[in-house]
Image (tube, grey):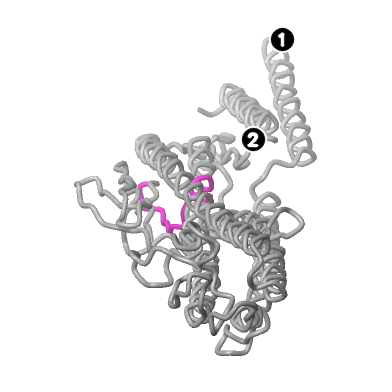
Amino acid sequence: MPGIHGILQTASRTMWASQTGVEVSSHNIANINTPGYSRQQAQFDPSMAINVRGLMIGTGVDVTNIRSVQDRFLSYQIFAGQSTFSQADTRAQGMSQIEEIFNEAAGYGLTQAFSEFFSALHDLGNMPDGESERITLVGAAENLTTQFHQADERLRQMQKSADQSIGISVGQVNSLLNDIASLNKKIAEIESGGQSASDLRSQRTTIMQELAGFVDFSSYETDNGMVNITLAGGYSLVEGAKAGSLTTERNDDGFLDVFFESSTGRRSNVTDKIEGGSIGGDLQTREVDCQDFIDKLDELAYTFLNEFNNVHNQGTNLNGNTGVDFFWHDVTGGTVIEGSARTIRLSAAIQADTDNIAASLTGEPGDNQNALALAQLESAKIFNGGTWTILEYNNSIIANAGSRAQSATRAADQANTALGQVEGMRESLVGVSYEDEMASLMEFQSTYQAAARVFNVVQDMLDTLYSI
């Protein structure tokens, strides 16, 4: 509308636009410490010009939208970085616990137990018919088997703990997937009307980063503002307003496998598809790290007891018998080695009667030849293709636990640093700056005051007109 009334409308639009700008800046400042919040901006566009006496005269400014500042590429990097860090951190915590299991200062007793066992064997060699020496040897052997059992049990308890964590995490993942699908629907509804769902988008980004802390995924945004989230292998965790789900089921080993169940009911085992996030870290701890050291203990126990029994069987005990095993273990597992550390114990014959210890080769009184042969196993190269002794192989397990724990911690630190750098880049781009918002407030205030001044000028013009 031309004329003085048009001037008033232009000033009014300017004041309303400035007020909106103040409201947006105030909202930004209020959320300066809100995790995942993206700075919002009012979008100002010139109002439609009108023809006044052959001239196109502008009519001020309109606020056409309020949008949040976004950088999808950085968001995707953050999701990937969060998955990598959560996996690395979870695994580092697991390896730290494994290192503690094999820390002699903290109670790992196999090294000392082997030393005491072979010391008792040397004593038996000096007194092959001695009853107290035989009793001492049996006690040392029982302590040795106990140390195997304790180390093995602690590793298996770690596996159970990681397994329980997987089950809990799967439930949390499902809750997040439902939240994302719900936000997808709300965002699409709002933005289909030409508005921007800025706060809902910030919430969704925050939830997606939380999801990345549990599991790795890929994602993309569709034209209607929804995000689709896919697990490795093409399994759609979220598709538009529909969410799939993860479930768990016990496998033959008694551990939880993770299954994907689509919104249409399709079900697939995706355990081997999950590599990132805390679930990926727990799977690594359960399936690889703990199991690897259980296997190492089994090999140590089996090779030792097998070699010891082979020598012991050649000897003659005080009852005149040969071929008596000193140690026993359960061989009902998958292999003769599997479960050795868990089940190694004294044979029934040795438990029943210490006279069944075969210290002699000939059976003659005072013959210590077999006791000496058994004692020599301490320095025999029976591990690693005949290059390591019992102690050397045991020490290699301890060293391997330490080096892998250090490597895992280093990987977690590096992943944390990388994530922090990307988050810093995102914060500098889309985060709220107090200084910038205060500058915007001052700018909007000045514009508002200037527009208000226009009203005063128009009033003076009207007074002049009325006085004519």
Residue 252 on image: x %, y %: 30, 57
Mark 2 / mark 1, whichever is N-terminal: 2
As displayed, is residue 249 above or below residue 310?
above
Count the marks.
Answer: 2
Q: Badge 2, how many Cα within 10 Å: few under 14, some, many 20+?
A: some
**Residue 225 colored magenta?**
no
Disc 2 on helix, strand or loop? loop
Residue 399 seen from this side: no
What range of the chain is rendered magenta?
A: 209-224
- Looking at the picture, tell me which residue is in the foreground, 305 or 461: 305
Residue 230 seen from this side: yes
Q: Residue at x 50, y 57 (%)?
A: 351
Q: Is residue 318 left or right of residue 118?
A: left
Under mark 1, the amino acid is Ser
- Looking at the picture, tell me which residue is in the foreground, 114 or 44: 114
For label 2, the residue is 34
For label 1, the residue is 467
Q: Is residue 201 left or right of residue 170?
A: right
